[in-house]
Amino acid sequence: MQDNESTVAYKPKLPSPNAFDYYYSLGSQLHDMPYESSGLPLLPREVQWLRRNQSVFRTLAQAQNKPYILPEPFIEAMEFPYFAMFRQLARAVSLQVRWHVSENDGADAVRDWRSGFKLARDLYGDTMLGVLVAVACEAVVNIAIAPHVPQYLSAREARELARTLQAAETEPDRLMTIVEGELRFALKELRRLLADDSRQARENLREFHKIETEPLENGLSPDSDELQTARRQWQAVENRLAHYIQNPAAYQRLRRDAEQQLQRHATRAFEAFALVGGRFQPREAPSPNTGDPVLDYLVEHLNPLAMAYPTALRYWETRTRRRLLALHCQLREHYLRERRYPDTLKLLPLGDWAVDPFSGELPIYRHQGDSYTLYSVGVTGKDLGGYRRKPSDPPDTPENLFVIPGVRGSL
């Protein structure tokens, strides 16, 4: 395992054959970037920053056709400081895209959007945490261009954007490889902690616990409820470890049970991301309470797939928005060619990429005159007429999923 300092000390050299080096180098340069708005017009300080930093986007464009390879110092690192830099880089791209839109420059908007979209797509291949950051980066980049597709893009620009989105939807899904990699790492760490000798295992776990709880100890008062609860839980682990030292057969069962629990989480993670029955169906993590404090502690601290369950929903919502954005682009191209919107989505050149993952069917499309509405049923799986939660609604109010709520044609 590499420590956090090794990742910070990474020094990429440009030009490089690896897109990662461009992202890492540029991300570390964006400390003074303003990001205070998300619409148009841009704030004066945002425009000033963009004018000073056009070299960032010229350099980023050089990564467009390069493969992304995670360097060795990062592969087994538990901390990923570069993720924050990559999110900042996605925000810079978003700012640049909105500037192009404000200047009515659709070609350059699409060009720079593609750089940010590739950044997000590359991150999907890292780790489960990388998937979360990729979802955030893609949302930041897409929200800069999605509302402007119907008003600003030419037919050629809309077609180019749609093809990039469709290509991403037809590429092999790398999430299963990520789940397998996370499981391999967790099992490797488990076998290190639960050494052949139970007394060595106790020492390993004590050292592991010290490292895990140091931030908690430093950040909370000694009499805080959270810290007291953590101490009681660890005392239960210590008591159980003493039992295992006296019972070698029970200790061997613990080692087997711990591996089986991690395998079980991996299986459930596969199910969470799979479109069972042709549509997304929510999955919950297996219960962490086995009745054995040592086993529960190990699964809680070693299971890298715990975030897979909420991540699965965000992942499929992101891919659904991606598909809706591609359809908006196709509708824009059709409108500019035919001077009207189609009566049905089936008049567009569609493929499997166009299916709504939450229904297993095409998204809801309603065309009326010179306007249309397009949306996904979302996690509800039901057509609610395109309803979106209002600020006054309870957080669990059912809603449908939009990219652009309603579109009117503009030639």
Image: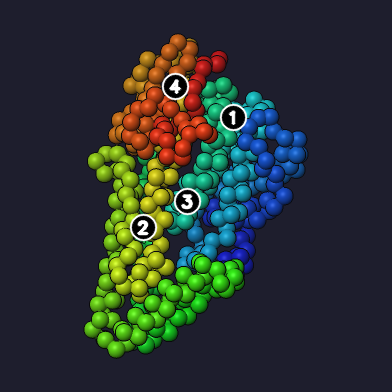
Task: Choose the circle earlier in sequence order: 4 or 2.
Answer: 2
Residue at label 1?
107
Three-letter code, disc 4: Thr
Residue ID at (59%, 70%):
221
Mark 2 crowd level (few <14, some 14–19, many ≥20, 10 Å Cα): many
Classify residue 297 as left or right of residue 141.
Answer: left
Determine if residue 161 is in view.
Answer: no
Task: Choose the circle earlier in sequence order: 2 or 3.
Answer: 3
Task: Choose the circle earlier in sequence order: 4 or 1.
Answer: 1
Q: Do the residues labelled 4 and 1 touch (CB within 8 Å)?
A: no
Q: Are marks 2 and 1 in contact (CB under 8 Å)?
A: no
Mark 3 crowd level (few <14, some 14–19, many ≥20, 10 Å Cα): many
Residue at label 3?
132
Task: Choose the circle earlier in sequence order: 3 or 4.
Answer: 3
Residue ID at (42%, 35%):
397
Residue at label 4?
373
Disc sitting over residue 179 in the figure: 2
Three-letter code, disc 2: Val
Residue 25 higher or lower than 290, as above or below: above
Residue ID at (49%, 48%):
134
Q: How far apart are marks 2 and 3 (CA)?
A: 13 Å
SS for callout 3: helix
Classify residue 25 as left or right of residue 360.
Answer: right
Task: Choose the circle earlier in sequence order: 1 or 3.
Answer: 1
| Residue 317 position within the rendered picture, expressed as x and y whole percent measured from the top left | 42, 40
